[in-house]
Image (cartoon, rainbow, N blue to C red):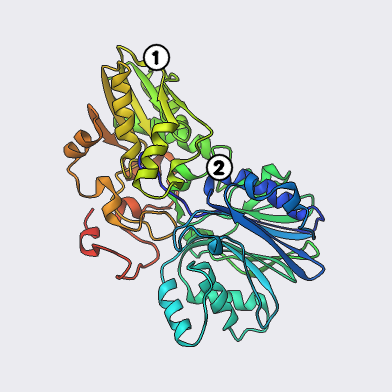
């Protein structure tokens, strides 16, 4: 991915097994690609909530000593990077709260568009916040609810707050899981035997030996009771679903499922569709490792071109989208990717990437490919031009960060150093993914959840693609 997006976290919840905390840790390993700033697990043991969390990768936070402090038959886990709230220890999740209806821990993936408005209203009523996250706003709204159960207080809170989210709540009754009414952020239900569990992606279910059952429906709230039963607290409607298109394009692991369908297969079809729409006069196809490789495979198959290993990834650097600031991202890109000169020397290259956001990666890649002897670099992007900020949990809330937003296509091509540059169409995304509806707001500017004007910087410009 050129410019490296950051996505809002991964969550997991499980009940009904004394191995709950350790299984949560295994699930977080599988979800590490969704957040690398912090990791945390909350466990329910004899009515008490135990919490361990810290800054860093899962393997750094959850040493054997730290895992040994957790016990219980229910747990939730979280890996984070910051969209709302900075990268600081107090913002690591799950967050723990004491409330009128009992203690609970909360972990959240996504972004609430009206969180700041609600926070100011709560502060005016005397609420004291300990973090800068929108997750804490959910907890305070729950605490102010007049509902007689924690399940009811969560329903009340989510009726007042809007955006894209998936969240899990650990309390004395078990685990609650909820997904936003448009299903923008993913959440899936699985089972280990008869015991239910929830995760941001099916790869986490596989990691703990669970079988995928279904996606949590948009707007649905599920209660995984401490005894291992499954209760529907609020119904959902699949007909309204607008899953974030970037889950298929980039964020989710290729071995995960979305709506029960293979992420890998979806990316392969995106590449084939890109080949139909934007063929390049190239000798070979290179994909930017790792998320773009299935699209590159599809592109090569569509055009009958060889796909070769011309770019090598240093797997110990990690996703550069996690590095805050432009300097950090640039340094990360330079350490992360290198060229195999023997593959590209004297040949014209079709370079396939899943998206072009800030352009940091792509500028570097076109440069090092030419230095290695490529005669031409034709850049093809397996998604449309990224023109509008995301307000539902991706780190592009400022339009100024988007390289394609204001530049003429020819200027953009020159800026990244490509011989030619073409994008997949929005219609092509829907065609390749089976004509299912998606949130395409970052491409089209059509936001399924209304965004307050104070968040929509340059809102007048954003209305025009």
Q: Is residue 345 left or right of residue 238?
A: left
Using the image as rendered, state which of residue 253 and residue 399 is in the foreground.
Answer: 399
- Which residue corresponds to mark 2? 261
The answer to whether any part of residue 11 appears in the image is no
- Circle 2 crowding by C-alpha within 10 Å: few under 14, some 14–19, many from 20: few
- Which residue corresponds to mark 1? 343
Q: Is residue 331 left or right of residue 232?
A: left
Whether pointer 1 and pointer 2 mark residues with C-beta atoms closer than 8 Å, the reply is: no
Q: Is residue 319 left or right of residue 277?
A: right
Q: Quadrant of the N terminus?
A: top left
Q: Is residue 373 left or right of residue 316?
A: left
Seen at 75% across and 61% down, the residue is 74
- Circle 1 crowding by C-alpha within 10 Å: few under 14, some 14–19, many from 20: some
Residue 70 pos. (x, y %)? 76, 58
Height in image: 181 above or below 326? below
Residue 419 pos. (x, y %)? 22, 26
The answer to whether any part of residue 294 appears in the image is yes
Using the image as rendered, state which of residue 286 and residue 329 is in the foreground.
Answer: 329
Secondary structure under the numbered disc 1 in the rendered image: helix
Seen at 48% across and 77% down, the residue is 160
Q: Which mark is residue 172?
A: none
Q: Earlier in the sequence, mark 1 or mark 2?
A: 2
Seen at 45% across and 52% down, the residue is 244
Residue 85 pos. (x, y %)? 46, 63
Q: Quadrant of residue 375?
A: top left
Secondary structure under the numbered disc 2 in the rendered image: strand
- Rounded to the nearest whole Å, what is the CA distance between mark 1 and mark 2? 34 Å
Height in image: 152 above or below 4? below
Q: Quadrant of residue 11?
A: bottom right
């Amino acid at each position: 991915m050129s410019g490296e997006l950051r996505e809002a976290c991964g969550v997991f919840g499980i009940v009904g097994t004394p191995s709950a905390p350790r299984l949560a840790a295994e699930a977080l390993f599988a979800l590490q690609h969704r957040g690398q700033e912090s990791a945390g697990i909350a466990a329910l043991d004899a009515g008490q909530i135990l919490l361990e969390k810290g800054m860093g990768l899962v393997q750094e936070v959850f040493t054997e000593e730290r895992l040994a402090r957790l016990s219980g038959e229910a747990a939730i886990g979280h890996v984070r990077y910051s969209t709302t709230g900075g990268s600081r220890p107090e913002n690591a999740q799950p967050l723990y709260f004491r409330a009128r209806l009992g203690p609970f821990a909360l972990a959240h993936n996504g972004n609430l568009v009206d969180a700041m408005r609600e926070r100011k209203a709560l502060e005016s009523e005397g609420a004291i916040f300990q973090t800068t996250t929108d997750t804490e706003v959910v907890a305070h709204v729950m605490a102010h609810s007049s509902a007689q159960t924690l399940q009811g207080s969560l329903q009340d809170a989510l009726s007042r707050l809007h955006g894209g989210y998936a969240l899990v709540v650990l309390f004395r009754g078990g685990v609650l899981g909820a997904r936003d009414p448009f299903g923008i952020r993913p959440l899936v239900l699985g089972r280990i035997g008869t015991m239910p569990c929830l995760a941001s992606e099916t790869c986490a279910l596989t990691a703990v030996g669970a079988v995928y059952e279904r996606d949590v429906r948009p707007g649905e709230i599920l209660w995984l009771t401490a005894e291992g039963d499954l209760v529907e607290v609020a119904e959902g409607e699949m007909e309204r679903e607008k899953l974030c298109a970037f889950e298929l394009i980039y964020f989710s692991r290729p071995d995960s499922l979305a709506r029960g369908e293979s992420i890998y297969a979806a990316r392969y079809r995106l590449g084939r569709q890109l080949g139909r729409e934007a063929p390049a006069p190239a000798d070979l196809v290179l994909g930017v490792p790792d998320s773009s490789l299935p699209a590159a495979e599809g592109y090569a198959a569509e055009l009958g071109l060889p796909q070769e290993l011309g770019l090598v990834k240093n797997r110990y650097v990690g996703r550069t989208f996690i590095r805050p600031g432009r300097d950090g991202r640039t340094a990360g890109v330079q350490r992360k990717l290198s060229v195999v000169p023997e593959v590209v020397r004297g040949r014209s290259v079709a370079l396939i990437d899943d998206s072009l956001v800030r352009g940091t990666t792509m500028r570097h890649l076109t440069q090092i490919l030419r230095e290695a002897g490529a005669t031409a670099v034709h850049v093809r992007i397996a998604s449309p031009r990224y023109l509008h900020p995301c307000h539902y949990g991706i780190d592009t809330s400022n339009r100024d960060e988007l390289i394609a937003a204001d530049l003429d296509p020819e200027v953009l091509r020159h800026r990244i150093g490509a011989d030619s540059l073409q994008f997949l169409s929005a219609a092509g995304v829907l065609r390749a993914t089976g004509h299912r509806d998606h949130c395409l707001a970052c491409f089209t500017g059509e936001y399924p959840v209304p965004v307050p004007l104070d968040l929509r910087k340059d809102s007048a410009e954003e209305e025009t693609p």
